[in-house]
Amino acid sequence: MTIRGVLALRKRQVLILFVLLGLSEAGPNSVHYSVAEETEIGSFVANLARDLGLGVEELSSREARVVSDDNEKHLHLNLLTGDLLLNKRLDREELCGSTEPCVLHFQVVLQNPLQFFWAELHIKDINDHSPTFLDKEILLKISESATTGTTFLMESAQDLDIGSNSLQNYTISPNSHFYIKIQDSGYGKIYPELVLDRELDHEEEPELRLILIALDGGSPPRSGTTLVLIKVLDINDNAPEFPQKLYEVQILEDTPIGSWIITITAKDLDAGYYGKISYMFFHASEDIRKTFEINPTSGEVHLRSSLDFEVIQSYIINIQATDGGGLSEKCTLLITVIDINDNAPEVTMSSVTKIIPENASETLVALFSVRDQDTGENGRTVCSIQDDVPFFLKPTFKNFFTVVSEKALDREVRAEYNITITVIDMGTPRLKTECNLTVMVSDVNDNAPAFTQTSYTLFVRENNSPALHIGSVSATDRDAGANAQVTYSLLPPQDPQLPLASLVSINADNGQLFALRALDYEALRVLEFGVGAVDRGSPALSSQALVRVLVLDANDNSPFVLYPLQNGSAPCTELVPRAAEPGYLVSKVVAVDGDSGQNAWLSYQLLKATEPGLFSVWAHNGEVRTARLLSERDAAKHRLLVLVKDNGEPPLSASVTLHVLLVDGFSQPYLPLPEAAADAAQADPLTVYLVIALASVSSLFLFSVLAFVAVRLCRRGRAAWVGGCSVAEGHFTGHLVDVGGTGTLSQIYQSEVRLMGGTGTDEFKFLKPIIPNLSVHDTDRNIEESENFRNSFGFNIQ
């Protein structure tokens, strides 16, 4: 009852195909190929391109690849030729054991679109293994009472080859007592039996040594031998007996090594040495002997090495009981391995897209398969991904899954996603496998640069140095890489007459603005222009912002005196009657300042006077007035130096000189000439005294005459001088300009002086306003009119 078929289960593998992508369906037919085992690496198997009806270029463009069920790279597809080549030496016995036929299942996977073809590779057996006996020596104890025709079980040889290359025959070395009889085990295996052909005689020959030869059917055949040692025993007429022929036991695959499994016992009616029974495995494969052991005395079976349900699910063990007389009996022990959930699910990634564009929807991210080597509920799996990512898991064919984006992504919202694929089996306890994928979202130029402000206001003080950095504009782009690199530029001005390019420039890389030349507040107070920001994407996106540059005034203009003018050939003298009351308006200093604000606030100050305390200048309007009553002791001619100062920092100033002549009345004919007054001011007092002394000594009379004549001539000269100013019976006009706090002209006055010669009385009309205002822009005209005013009097102002 030897069950040799257990070898068919040796090294059997459960091959599970996981479809890599379910976006397309497999081809309806499978392709079959065959190759002999141990064929050289790189050997040609078939031309897949021809067999699948595809072009070589299509194989390459669709990234064809070969995927085996056991995830081993047995085959290699040459994309340049379409040839299917061996990637390694194939050992049929290692791959399939005793299974026939030996078939390797693989798929040819094509992408774009996804398509796959079933294929099988049959591995043909060659006679590369000789029959071998596990025992180098077979010991047989045969009683001399054995009758002719008695058969004795022999240990069979092992041959890993199959078919005609497997074990086919047994022979024994020539002898006169035994021959070999071949028996079929019923599982496709044969085993030898030693048949007694002639009775033994212990006294004649107590021991025989024979050679048992095992032959396979290969060409040429291979063989293996073992020594058969036969010891002839005295008579033993009772063989051991087992209570039952078949023993069955179940054992968990995680049973610890050394654990007791079962005790097999047999009984022998003989007594003494002939009744002593020993136990041993009979016809046991190498796997059985490595996994289990039996106590030869007690018959206890123990676990020798770890069990693995995924490798071998059951063991059929033949146990032989032999008594001291050499009689034996056998029974069968069937050990079934019970699966436990000791294998976590396995995730095999076939295709991973690590970078996807942000504007693409339903993009394939990953292609993977799942398998669990356990069986039943332990091998059932559930696959999932987390809910907080915009991806979904799509089951395709069998245990194939794809991870696909569920919508178009936005890199500016999130640039990276970590996807965790979780696979849990349904066993107890449940085992879990996690696989992490990192998906980067590539940028698309979908965001225009955005300025930090819609408008920028910059301030720059006039008279700046050329190439002065006056400020910056900044724009950011939410994209990345070249799509986020911003270039700045000046936009064409709305006013084509504005020379914007010669006034300002912008750094194209960082948006810094520079004034190319010195700005003048008085010429340009506000400069408005547009700036643009464009990225380097394709197509490029842009945005605009308004820049307003305010030129700040600097105190770079000194006050300019409009009246009295200082560039005339002769100064103009102001006439003041001696009867004037305190506060009498003598004149008004009119000045302007080209600046603005406090830089144009003018103040007036009397710096120097011939007689201090007689005249005062109002600080805010420049009016020169008498400070007290005039007396006869006051000098007739006065020179006033008035300072005009602005309120800038530092302050700038200008000065003007006023000539004031005190007269008894406007009809007085004795007005000194300006030239005589100037000569008298410059004469040396000592010389005058000497002349007077000498004249007095020479002749008092002559001095009196000369003095009288001189006084008369002087008075006539004054009358002529006043007539030159055109004051008799006539009007004269002149423009006096008043400057207010803002530097603008406030009043224009007409002064009229009339001298009435016939009546003996003097009339004086002064400062009659005729125009209320005058703007700064009328400065040139005012200067001209002031010049006319000066010329109308015939005065020279110094």
Image (cartoon, rainbow, N blue to C red):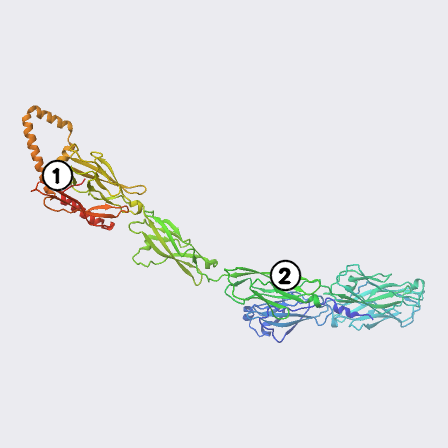
**Above/below status of 593 relative to 46:** above
Task: Locate residue 423: give its quadrant.
Answer: bottom right
Question: Is 584 placed left or right of 756 in the picture?
Answer: right
Does the image show residue 336? yes
Question: Is 510 placed left or right of 499 in the picture?
Answer: right
| 354, 89: nearer the viewer | 354
| 562, 186: nearer the viewer | 562
Residue found at the far top of this picture: 697
| 694, 492: nearer the viewer | 694
Secondary element at tag 1: loop
Secondary element at tag 2: strand
Residue found at the far bottom of this picture: 28
Name the residue carrying label 1.
Answer: 665
Where does the image place residue 67, in percent across and percent down from the top left?
A: 62, 67
Where does the image place residue 396, in percent across and percent down from the top left?
A: 61, 70
Residue type, label 2: Glu
**Above/below status of 166 relative to 298:** below
- Label 2 to label 1, Cα distance in Å? 119 Å
Name the residue carrying label 2.
Answer: 434
Of badges 2 and 1, nearer the viewer stands 1
